[in-house]
Amino acid sequence: MLESESPKSAVPPSAKPVEVRPPVHQSIPPSGGLAVHAEWLGDHSFTRLHGSRFAYVVGEMARGIATPQMVVEAVRAGLVGFYGSAGLRPETISDGLSEIETGLGPNAPAWGANLIHSPQQAGYERAVVDLFLRRKVARVSASAFMALSPEIVRYSAAGLSRAKDGTIERGTHVFAKVSRAEVARQFMAPAPEKMLQDLVAKGDITSEQATLAASVPVAGDITAESDSGGHTDNRAAGPLFSSLAQARLETSKVHNLDPDSIRIGLGGGIGTPWAAAAAFQMGAAYIITGSINQAAVESGLSLEGRKLLADAGPADVAMTPAADMFEQGVHVQVLKRGTLFPMRGNRMRAIYLSRSGFSDCSPEEKKFIETALGESFEAAWQKTREFLAASNPGDLARADQDPKRQLALVFRRYLFFGAQWARDGDPARIRDYQIWCGPAMGAFNEWVKGTPLEPLESRSVRQIAWNLLDGAAHITKLQALRASGTDVPQSAFDYRPGLFE
């Protein structure tokens, strides 16, 4: 077991001051000594159900940044790993699933993939759910949902069955990533009857599955997403978690559900042992990390992008327009240090709001736009037209008659390619890299500075997670001792990372 202390620095069962933990790491597993084990953190039903050693999720960073290799290494380290399949073509996702299955073997537990709500891409959600059900993907992390869609309900219901003892078993598990109680309540409750009956009428689920779905939550795992990289409401962790805990209590009463059947995890801002310990102390069933894994060796982000992340501080982030919902004013949190991307994205949004099209822009604005694009507006629009002609002819027909729409689509193309350039490591576009990043990345960098985890080549998901978990166990034990009357000096709560064997 991972333990918070080696025997040498075990906390004495007396009121004597506690020694400061030395900044070195023991082997895995240590033995002896008074300890809080990392396996004990979180909800034990979570680890039993999902087959992981720890209540720790390696989150699904979109467009393949959370690679199949990252998922495999996460599971091998005793974690739950999610493939960053959002935004990828179904055939690419299928290849990724095959890579994971090759690495872990068939029917391996503790892993899943991402399903992102995509109302602007007709048929995409259905194609991905078809793939997940056909390939027997047992866990899906649902993100960007503001309301239930038929496809996420179909996935949830399709795995329900009645056991011999009469209990309802799940073969498909939904992790719903939310930042608002009103969204969480929909996932905590059974699916709406009309939606279930419509799915039955279409032949998507059976009548028995619809009946079972009417008595269980759509999602058994709710991930509270506080201030994080990418799409975020910048919510503070404490108020968000308490809001969702209250929503669980009220929703369970309304629908006569067992509140313990709904686990609430916490993500966003978790980049140090102190943040992890705080999440577990609040009652989080599990924790989830994202930004810090982008700098891991298994990440799909380019080396150039990972180097930029390694230089970030907690304040080196900014909000900028999201490519997929540019016109609606939706923003994402990205890395600011070393890139012009967030500033350029925000100025594009301001120009879009104030101008009727490119021809309406001032000479200075036109120069800014074409400098950011790296080409003339006409050339960028022609490339955008070619893409739409193949993917969405209806949208192209509307855009050809609307210069403001053309402006939006060209800006969206720039925002989209910012993430692509960061993944590819295009050296000519380094100032335009879009790297989703929250404050946790900077906190992590400060914590590991001058330690064996500072070099990028040492940052595997295993080393990152085990250090966070072991440190959280260390802090949790000391806090429990302090609460029981033991004199624990403040310096004892320090925890320096090292490399586990």
Image (cartoon, rainbow, N blue to C red):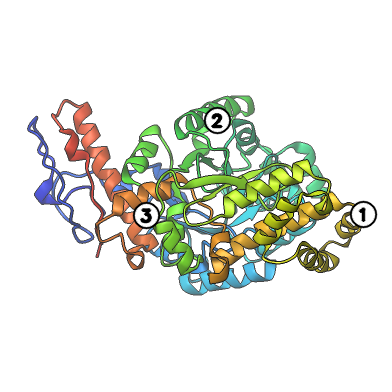
Q: CA distance from mark 2 to mark 3?
A: 26 Å
Above or below, 500 relative to 166? below
Rendering coords of residue 79 (x, y %): 41, 56
Query: Which tag, 2 or 3, sits closer to the chain's start?
Result: 3
Rendering coords of residue 54 (x, y %): 37, 51
Q: CA distance from mark 1 to mark 2?
A: 48 Å
Residue type at mark 2?
Arg
Residue that numbered label 3 is attached to? 53
Residue that numbered label 1 is attached to? 401
Considering the image in quadrants, where does the C terminus appear?
Answer: bottom left
Helix, strand or loop for disc 3: loop
Q: CA distance from mark 3 to mark 1?
A: 57 Å
Considering the image in quadrants, where does the N terminus appear?
Answer: bottom left
Query: Which tag, 3 or 1, sits closer to the chain's start?
Result: 3
Q: Residue at x 17, y 39 (%)?
A: 492
Rendering coords of residue 498 (x, y %): 24, 58
Few, some or many C-alpha atoms within 10 Å of disc 3 (few <14, some 14-19, many ≥20)? many
Helix, strand or loop for disc 2: helix
Name the front one of labels 1 and 2.
Answer: 1
Residue type at mark 3?
Arg
Query: Which tag, 1 or 2, sits closer to the chain's start?
Result: 2
Q: Which of the 4 image quadrants contains residue 499?
A: bottom left
Q: Is residue 36 left or right of residue 307?
A: left
Name the front one of labels 3 and 1.
Answer: 1
Nearer to me, 285 or 374? 374
Is there any visible trace of residue 85 in the rendered image?
A: no
Residue type at mark 1?
Gln
- Point out which mark residue 248 bears: 2
Q: Residue at x 11, y 50 (%)?
A: 7
